[in-house]
């Protein structure tokens, strides 16, 4: 009966379903964001808990130990990062003085070249700042309340991880029962593929952040940039966010160099380091450690980034690529969704080259 339905009716139904999905994602983001994070961490920690079970450690202690290992690992990273931020905050008064000196030099440059007085410049800046503050007042309370709720929900992530791991077999059987018309082996294969994609992506991203942190920090230290390790790690973490994160992560150390150094060559050097490391990451590091686990074309990645930012904000920007990878796997394994998987997927270069390669000798022999 669905095949006999007119095209415009099908399109309308699909559009309404998409709107309903987006509505549910927006209204349920306080629950869905921590739960999605827990799902990815469950995929990441499953090999550890399975290995512990193989070592004849009971199931519940194995799950708890895997969660504890994750807490120690990420807790150590957070502690180190916070210590770098505290060191940076100690230098804020001095940085503020340097900012005022740079700002006065900039004002003098504008007055000399454009004949705009310092009073007019300050008046314009104060006007824009006041307008920004007035428009921001309406959002401040919402941001703080949303942030507090999100932090409170983050405490539930270990609980989600525990139960998702403990009931993984029951969840798998539940999904199989929902798809009675599908061969159970195909469903298991799909679930295994989604788990594999998530594990590869998360492991690759963690290793990628570690390598980039070392490279960025080393380059900044050689240039004598203040708080080089902090900005090296920050640029590496922001690299997780496609496109936008790379830009912000590059601009922050450049701004620091402009603020703390008298010569512009230092800022140019910092920019060269960020671009060189990004070149290495795009062409060697990411293909090696992350691979093609999330084979999404750039256009689909940008669209996914924008939509996820509108729906879930900053957490959505971080989660958009692994979620898009899972959607891609689901589309590739479902006949009705394969066109969408093809649309958002990335071309296989070998197949493209093989398809469009032209050998004149073979052509002449074939058409002799």
Image (cartoon, rainbow, N blue to C red):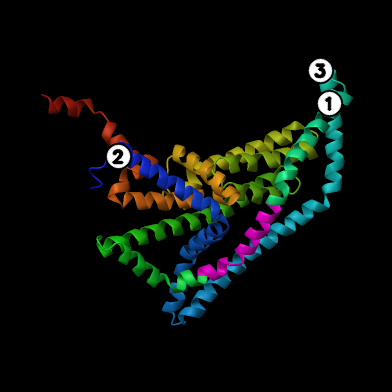
For label 3, the SS is helix
| Place of residue 164 in the rendered image (x, y in percent of width and height, measured from the top left) | 47, 69
In primary-sequence order, the first of circles 3 and 2 is 3
Q: Please provide percent x and percent y for residue 194.
A: 39, 57
- Position of the C terminus, as image quadrant, is top left
Relative placement, left or right, of 345 versus 130 is left
Relative to the observer, which residue lies in front, 281 or 107?
107
Main SS of the magenta part reads helix
For residue 68, above or below residue 181? below
Question: In the rendered structure, which disc, 3 or 1, sits on the residue that comes first in sequence?
Answer: 3
Q: Determine the CA span between mark 3 and mark 2.
A: 57 Å
The magenta-colored residue range is 143-161
Going 45% across and 37% down the picture, which residue do you hit? 299
For the residue pair 344 and 226, the one nearer the viewer reads as 344
The residue sitting at 31% across, 52% down in the picture is 333
Q: Earlier in the sequence, mark 2 or mark 1?
A: 1
In this rendering, is residue 337 above or below 109? Answer: below
Mark 3 to mark 1: distance in Å?
A: 13 Å
Q: Within the magenta stretch, is there residue 178?
A: no
Secondary structure at badge 1 equals helix
Q: Are marks 3 and 1 in contact (CB under 8 Å)?
A: no
SS of the residue under disc 2? helix
Q: Are marks 3 and 2 in contact (CB under 8 Å)?
A: no
Which residue is tagged 1? 121
Q: Where 111 sits versus 89, above or below?
A: above
Q: Residue at x 36, y 53 (%)?
A: 330
Q: Find disc 3 in the rendering and name its residue.
A: 113
Numbered tag placed on residue 149 in the rendering: none
In front of the other: label 3 or label 2? 3
The picture places residue 279, in percent across and down from the top left corner, at 54, 39
Indicate which disc residue 351 carries: 2
């Amino acid at each position: 009966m669905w095949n006999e339905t007119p095209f415009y009716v099908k399109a309308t139904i699909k559009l309404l379903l998409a709107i309903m999905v987006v509505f549910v994602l927006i209204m349920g983001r306080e629950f869905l964001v921590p739960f999605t994070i827990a799902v990815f961490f469950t995929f990441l920690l499953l090999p550890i808990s399975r290995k512990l079970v193989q070592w004849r450690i009971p199931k519940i202690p194995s799950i708890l130990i895997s969660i504890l290992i994750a807490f120690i690992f990420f807790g150590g990273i957070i502690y180190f990062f916070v210590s770098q931020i505290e060191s940076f905050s100690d230098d804020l008064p001095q940085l503020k003085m340097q900012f005022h000196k740079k700002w006065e030099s900039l004002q003098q440059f504008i007055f000399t070249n454009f004949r705009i007085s310092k009073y007019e410049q300050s008046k314009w800046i104060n006007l824009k700042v006041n307008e920004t503050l007035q428009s921001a007042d309406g959002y401040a309370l919402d941001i703080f309340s949303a942030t507090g709720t999100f932090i409170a929900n983050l405490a539930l992530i270990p609980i989600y991880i525990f139960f998702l791991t403990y009931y993984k077999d029951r969840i798998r059987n539940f999904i199989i029962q929902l798809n009675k018309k599908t061969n159970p082996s195909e469903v298991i294969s799909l679930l295994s593929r989604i788990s594999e994609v998530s594990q590869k992506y998360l492991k690759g991203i963690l290793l990628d952040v570690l390598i980039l942190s070392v490279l960025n920090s080393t380059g900044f230290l050689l240039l004598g940039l203040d708080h080089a390790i902090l900005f090296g790690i920050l640029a590496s973490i922001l690299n997780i966010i496609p496109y936008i994160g790379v830009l912000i992560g590059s601009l922050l150390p450049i701004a620091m160099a402009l603020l703390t150094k008298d010569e512009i060559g230092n800022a140019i050097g910092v920019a060269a380091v960020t671009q060189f490391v990004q070149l290495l990451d795009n062409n060697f590091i990411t293909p090696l450690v992350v691979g093609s686990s999330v084979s999404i074309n750039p256009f689909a990645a940008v669209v996914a980034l924008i939509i996820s930012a509108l729906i879930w904000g900053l957490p959505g920007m971080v989660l958009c690529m692994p979620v898009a990878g899972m959607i891609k796997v689901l589309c590739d394994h479902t006949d009705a969704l394969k066109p969408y998987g093809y649309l958002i997927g990335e071309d296989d270069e070998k197949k493209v080259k093989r398809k469009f390669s032209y050998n004149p000798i073979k052509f002449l022999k074939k058409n002799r």
